[in-house]
Image (cartoon, rainbow, N blue to C red):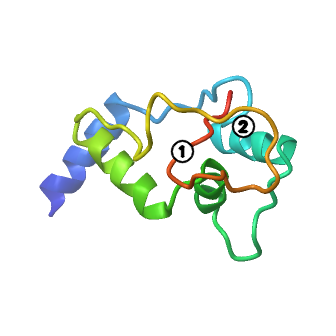
Amino acid sequence: MKAITRRLQKLERRFPSSSVRPAGPSAPEKISAWLAQNGIVRGESESLMATFARALGLTLSDVRAHLQRCAAGLRAYLPTDIGTYRSGPSQSNAPANPRVARFPSI
């Protein structure tokens, strides 16, 4: 156990954690701002990802599958018709066709 602890301490000295924070808002801050600009209200017990998925007309399962494919290094397309994008205001937060995503300009 001592050997592992020494090794970890040596590595921590060699590769210190970065205290530099990138300039500008973080990704969650950008997503929250985009949702607010488009009038999409986060539910009481809804996560930011769930709200974002709902705004795009996707389910959390769709988003999870997409992220897993990306993490695996596979070409990952959202479960939508890639050639079809909705534009302009809609009557509700959900697109008329739930399989067509509205991609934000973040």
Quadrant position of the C terminus in the picture: top right
How packed is label 1: few (under 14 Cα within 10 Å), some, or many (20 or more)? many
Camera-side residue: 22 or 87? 87
In the rendered image, the residue lying farthest to the front is 96
In the picture, measured across the screen, residue 102 lies left or right of residue 3, that is right
Image coordinates for residue 63, horizontal then vertical, percent: 45, 53
Q: Which mark is residue 70?
A: none
Which amino acid does the dot numbered 1 rest on? Val
Number of the front mark, 2 or 1: 1
Residue placed under numbered mark 1 in the picture: 100
Image coordinates for residue 33, horizontal then vertical, percent: 80, 41
At a point 53% along the width and 55% down the height, the residue shown is 58
How packed is label 2: few (under 14 Cα within 10 Å), some, or many (20 or more)? few
At a point 65% along the width and 53% down the height, the residue shown is 96
Separation of marks 2 and 1 at Cα, in angstroms: 22 Å
In the structure shown, which secondary structural element does the residue marked by tag 2 occupy?
A: helix
Which amino acid does the dot numbered 2 rest on? Lys
Camera-side residue: 13 or 52? 52
In the picture, measured across the screen, residue 15 lies left or right of residue 96, that is left
Camera-side residue: 16 or 71? 71
Image coordinates for residue 3, horizontal then vertical, percent: 13, 53
At a point 66% along the width and 45% down the height, the residue shown is 28
Residue placed under numbered mark 2 in the picture: 30
At a point 67% along the width and 36% down the height, the residue shown is 26
**Mark 2 / mark 1, whichever is N-terminal:** 2
In the picture, measured across the screen, residue 6 lies left or right of residue 52, that is left
In the structure shown, which secondary structural element does the residue marked by tag 1 occupy?
A: loop
Can you tell which quarter of the image residue 34 is in? top right
Q: Is disc 2 in contact with disc 1, using a CB cutoff of under 8 Å?
A: no
